[in-house]
Image (cartoon, rainbow, N blue to C red):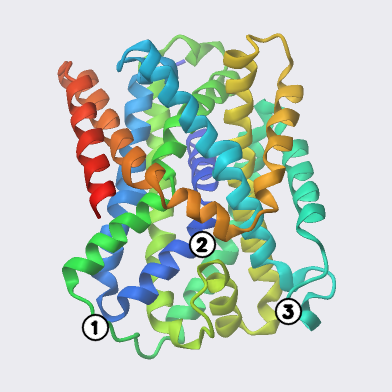
Amino acid sequence: MKHVPRKHILLTGLAIFSMLFGAGNLMYPLEVGMKTGSHYIIGLSGFIITAVLLPLIGLVSMILFNGDVHHFFNRLGKPVGQTLLFLCILVIGPLIGIPRIVTLSHTMISPFLPGGFFTQAGIMPPLIFSLIFLGITFLATFRENKIVPILGYVISPALLFSLLTIIIKGIYTAQTTILSTQSVGSLFSASLISGYETLDLLGTIFFASIILHILRNTLGDGIHNNTRLLATVSLKSGVIGVFLLALVYVGMGIIGAYHGHSVNSMYVDTLFREISFAILGICGAALIGTAVIMACLSTSIALSAVVAEYVEYTIFNKRLSFPVCLAIVLLSCVPLSIAGLGYVRAITAGPLLYIGYPVLITLTLCNLAYKLWDIRSVKVPVLVTFLVTLVSYLTR
């Protein structure tokens, strides 16, 4: 098999976009736009470096490692590598990734819940919402080979349509930006950190393996052992996915800079909801709700699949089936899912962000250099990065 239909590349690219564009990706570019205001170009430049360019580098690196996360992390030595891998799984699963999606989803769509338009808070308790949301995630994920079609054919088009409608209307009705009094340098560095918080580098590192696995199943034996063709298809799909990601980020950042005046509060978890209401009014509620639900579900499905696969193969050594492991993973996400976004963000903004993420970036760059130019150094650069960021974090 030497030719792969373009529809498969496009479908996979749309799926990658959906996997990466979660609920947090709705709020962070808006926040960058509001904080940088008239300097939004500077802010978005920093944000795109860490929220788009780094994930693409991570995807390329994992493709070169054939999606093998164990080989990727074990270049640090098996004990250290497996420990770091386990911590990353906790971050994208029950510790931060999935609970952040659930709690943010509840906050964002609370006006659309029963009684929400009248109380502005909804009447559905967080526990009930979490169980329903995670239940839907389970139903959409337990057939692993159906993930890409669900994301590519259903969720991505609905997500893109609703987001583009809000962005186009927001740009068309834009008047003046928020004036920023901060220095360009401080705005740029703060935007870089905001890009960290999307956790999309972690996303592409782990999503690469599931994308490769699903492509093999979808395209059949003709591509199964053709590593070069598989890498080419994955890379083309990845470029489509991150291009769409960058496009939406720029649009969201612009409407944040121009429509931030209309937001009554600076709570980051309600930015998208309030700005969208300001742009579309109450008549656009269905579009806003669609964007939120599609963004939340897409990433929740992908993260759940990755973590459940790790639990199935690494923790239980295939003694439990994928659906059982998936149920275990989702149930373990319930406690933090009802704790509130502030609690989850406090975990994110600590050592995991300021120490763990730079370490992961260094490992990714070293592994890329190893595959492209046979530069074998990895332990020393990662150790130096860890020590420097640790000292910086403790003395800040």
Pointer 1 or 2: first along the chain: 2
Asked whether the viewer can see residue 262, the reply is yes
- Number of disc labels: 3
Q: Position of residue 87 (x, y in %)?
A: 47, 30
Between 155 and 252, the one lying in front of the other is: 252
- Compared to residue 105, the image places residue 20 above or below, namely above
- Compared to residue 356, the image places residue 234 above or below, namely above
Pointer 3 or 2: first along the chain: 2
- Answer few, some or many: residues within 10 Å of disc 2's Cα (few below 14, many 20 plus, some between 14 and 19): many
Q: Which residue occupies 42% across, 29% down?
A: 233
Q: Amino acid at mark 3?
A: Gln
Q: Amino acid at mark 2?
A: Leu
Please tell me in which quadrant of the rendered image residue 287 appears.
bottom right
Q: Which residue occupies 53% across, 38% down?
A: 92
Q: CA distance from mark 1 to mark 3?
A: 33 Å
Between 337 and 67, the one lying in front of the other is: 337
Specify the label residue 95 is tagged with: none
Q: Secondary structure at mark 2?
A: helix
Callout 1–callout 2 Cβ contact below 8 Å: no
- Answer few, some or many: residues within 10 Å of disc 3's Cα (few below 14, many 20 plus, some between 14 and 19): few
Q: Quadrant of the C terminus?
A: bottom left
Q: CA distance from mark 3 to mark 2?
A: 20 Å
Asked whether the viewer can see residue 3, the reply is no
Pointer 1: what residue? 181
Callout 1–callout 3 Cβ contact below 8 Å: no
Mark closer to the observer (1, 2) = 1
Q: Position of residue 120 (x, y in %)?
A: 73, 79
Pointer 3: what residue? 120
User: For this view, does 168 lie left or right of residue 378?
Assistant: right
Pointer 2: what residue? 26
Task: Spot the residue most to the bottom.
Answer: 175
